[in-house]
Image: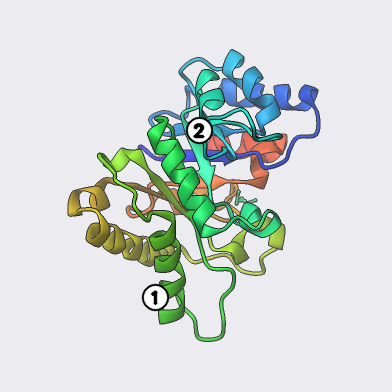
Amino acid sequence: MNKLIVFNFKMAPASFTEVKEVFHIFKRFSQKVKPNKIIIVPPYVYLAEASNIFEKECSLGAQDVFWFNRNSATGEISPKMLKSLGVEYVIVGHSERRKYFNETDEIINSKIKACLSNDLTPILCIGEKNRKEGDSSLSFRIKKILFEQLNYALRGVILENSSDLIITYEPVWAISANQPKELEDPEEIQKTISLIRFWLARRFSEKIAKNMRILYGGSVNSQNIIPFLSLKEINGVLVGRVSTNKIELTKLLKKLIK
Ligand code: PGA
């Protein structure tokens, strides 16, 4: 099983001492979980430490990026700065950034283009906010939301290879911060992922659609990671809250060892 596991630390942990403990757990397990590939995505302030600690065993991602390389953008981080620390991936369009920072589709599109032109791989997050009565992964309302998000985010984007972009389907209602009552059914996720592939084939090519990595995110933990990963259509998962919970993280990583 060769799947991609992205660990989005979000805005945690609160101290440098704690993040070093979390990195140590990844260091202990990252070779053992192969051929699965781990991408760790800590907050900016811990990226330099991660880049010192990890060699090739874990890849490094950032939670955001500014859309230009220039000096006058107080508080922001440029693609070049990330590259200089060995960052390879950037999460773009996460629902928490759409919500708290009013990130528009236009900004998301600019960030995707900035990543591509600086040789960083964007991990584009898309997903519907809620489910209404009678909605399923294939209902017209959900299709419309997902296709619109893809259309705007990838407007004018040219992809040379399927590995230039990663997509994560994250139904916002299933993210742990929202304390979901129910989890998305893995079979339903497979259907949604097939739908995203259908869109990619029409927008790019059959080949890109077939080979692009499409992940699932939303309350992935040590209990449900294996059922998610064992489905053929799901090329990996994006783990949020568990990434910095030392006990849960250890349990989850142990599950990945064959
Ligand atoms: P969660 O977060 O695993 O805590 O639900 C996923 C994410 O980063 O959105």
Q: Which residue is mark 1?
A: 138
- Please, what secondary structure does the residue beneath circle 1 have? loop
- Asked if 188 appears above or below 253 in the picture, the reply is below
Q: Which residue is mark 2?
A: 39
Asked if the beta carbon under badge 2 is closer than 8 A to the nearest atom of ligand 1, the reply is: no
Is residue 1 at least partly visible in the picture? Answer: no
Residue 208 image offset from top left, x and y in percent: 24, 48
CB of mark 1 within 8 Å of CB of mark 2?
no
Horizontally, residue 245 falls left or right of residue 194, namely right
Sequence order check: which comes first, mark 1 or mark 2? 2
Q: Give neighbour class at mark 2: few <14, some 14-19, many 20+ (Cα, 10 Å).
A: many
Residue 29 image offset from top left, x and y in percent: 55, 25
Q: Give neighbour class at mark 1: few <14, some 14-19, many 20+ (Cα, 10 Å).
A: some
From mark 1 to mark 2, how far is it between C-alphas?
30 Å
- Asked if 146 appears above or below 201 in the picture, the reply is below
Residue 22 image offset from top left, x and y in percent: 68, 28
Look at label 1 and name its amino acid: Leu
Looking at the rendering, in which quadrant would you find the N terminus?
A: top left
Residue 138 image offset from top left, x and y in percent: 39, 75
The structure residue drawn at horizontal position 37% and vertical position 56%, both measured from the top left corner, is: 155
Horizontally, residue 100 falls left or right of residue 146, namely right
Horizontally, residue 163 falls left or right of residue 152, namely left
Q: Which mark is residue 128?
A: none
Q: Who is closer to the viewer here, 162 or 258?
A: 162
Look at label 2 and name its amino acid: Ile
- Please, what secondary structure does the residue beneath circle 2 have? strand
The structure residue drawn at horizontal position 46% and vertical position 77%, both measured from the top left corner, is: 136
The structure residue drawn at horizontal position 45% and vertical position 45%, both measured from the top left corner, is: 112
